[in-house]
Image (cartoon, helix red, strand yellow):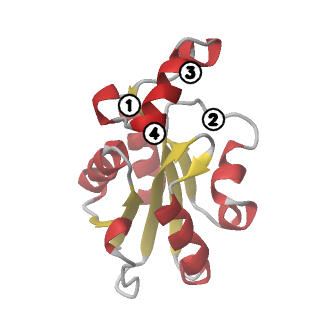
Amino acid sequence: MKTLITYASKTGTTKKAAALLAEKLGADVFDLSGGVPDLAAYETVVVGGSIRMGTLHSSAKRFLNESLDALKAKRYALFVCGCSPPDDGFFQNAFGSDALTDAVAVASFGGEMDMEKQKGADKLIVKMIQKTEIGKNMRTGLDEAEIKKFATALSKK
């Protein structure tokens, strides 16, 4: 069962998560900032992206929207990386209900808040959020247990 993990990352956290997942699955990895992959050789495709302010990275969102029919003809799964814990409607807002319908696994792998990688307005917003109650509840660091659980779900037929 050949698997492709596609991802879009702003600061590198999603890239790191995709690499960890690929290691567990023996999968190929494709950075969506480099274009659109050829899905023909793959039985399973994973789409991942960073999420900021509840919005999925534009490259991941575009790929998902443009490739949804092709994905639905295969096994596919979805993940996000972000510091906010998922709540009701989180995944529907990120991926859309049509994409969630047939996904074999959906998860949030946590996130990292590296201030060195933040720029301009993002840096200012992050600093402001960190001082609020929301900021105090943010998850920091990738959740390797969640990545392992996701990989296990994908490994099952």
In front of the other: 11 or 149: 11
Q: Is residue 148 above or below residue 30?
A: above
Instruction: Give the amino acid type for the residue marked by disc 4 in the picture.
Output: Phe
Q: Residue at x 63, y 12 (%)?
A: 133
**Residue nearest the observer in this picture, 3 or 137:** 137
Amino acid type of the residue that numbered disc 3 sits on in the rendered structure:
Ile
The label nearer to you, 2 versus 3, is 3
Can residue 97 be seen here? The reply is yes
Label 2 close to label 3 by CB (< 8 Å): no
Q: Which residue is mark 3?
A: 129
> Which residue is located at x 37 percent, y 35 percent?
118
- Percent across and percent down for residue 114 are 33, 29
Amino acid found under the numbered disc labelled 1: Glu
Secondary structure under tag 3 reads helix
The residue beneath circle 1 is 112
Q: Callout 2: few (<14), some (14-19), or many (20+) C-alpha neighbours within 10 Å?
A: some
- Element under label 1? loop
Judge left or right: residue 109 versus residue 54. left
Count the marks.
4
Q: Amino acid at mark 2?
A: Pro
Tell me the CA gap for discs 1 and 4: 10 Å
**Up-down: is 9 above or below 126?**
below
- Which part of the image, by quadrant, shows the N terminus? bottom left
In the image, which disc is placed on residue 109? 4
Mark 2, residue position:
86
